[in-house]
Image (cartoon, rainbow, N blue to C red):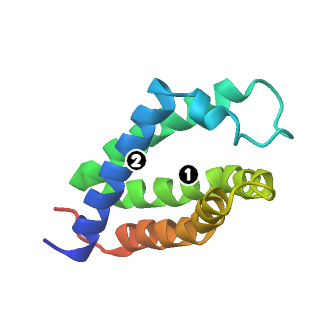
Amino acid sequence: MSGGRRAAGFLSVLLCASGILHLARPETFDGIVPRALPGPARAYTYASGVAEFGVTGLLAAPRTRHLGGIAAMALFVAVFPANLQMAYDARGARPQKRAIALGRLPLQGVLIAQAWHVATAGDRG
């Protein structure tokens, strides 16, 4: 299995699991939706879960894998403000919670790099 296919598989599993969590336990994510966004946080939580399922499908199918990599990059960039909100809100939290919140920030860069790898790998099968 090529690196691009492996990365696509990894991202597919990650995004599918995250999509399930967004829809099954939305209250877990509502609190990290940036308060500056208009409308209810729950709408953004559900929308991101649905988007994760859509990107999962694009990554899983060889014909749409390139587009899936691009869509995954866009999704990871789009949800980065939620990670920033989480880190901001964790300022006075327990050290473990702060470490998790801060650790998500560089992890987002790793995920974007993986999506870029999928988008540029050139392997469609």
Q: Residue at x 48, y 60 (%)?
A: 70
Question: Looking at the picture, does residue 65 appear above or below residue 52?
Answer: below
The answer to whether any part of residue 54 appears in the image is no
Badge 2 is on which residue? Answer: 15
Question: Looking at the picture, does residue 60 appear above or below residue 70?
Answer: above
Disc 1, SS: helix
Dividing the picture into quadrants, the one containing residue 88 is bottom right
Outermost residue on the left side: it is 1
Q: Quadrant of the C terminus?
A: bottom left
Q: Nearer the viewer, mark 1 or mark 2?
A: 2
Q: Position of residue 35 (x, y in %)?
A: 83, 38
Disc 2, SS: helix
Q: Position of residue 8 (x, y in %)?
A: 30, 61
Kindly identify the amino acid type of the residue bearing the numbered disc 2.
Leu
Question: Looking at the picture, does residue 74 appear above or below residue 56?
Answer: below
User: CB under 8 Å between callouts 1 and 2?
Assistant: yes
Q: Residue at x 40, y 37 (%)?
A: 53
Residue 20 placement, left or right of 44:
left
Q: Residue at x 22, y 63 (%)?
A: 124
Badge 1 is on which residue? Answer: 75
Kindly identify the amino acid type of the residue bearing the numbered disc 1.
Leu
Residue 101 placement, left or right of 119:
right
Which one is in front, 59 or 44?
Answer: 44
Label 1: few (<14), some or many (≥20) within 10 Å?
some
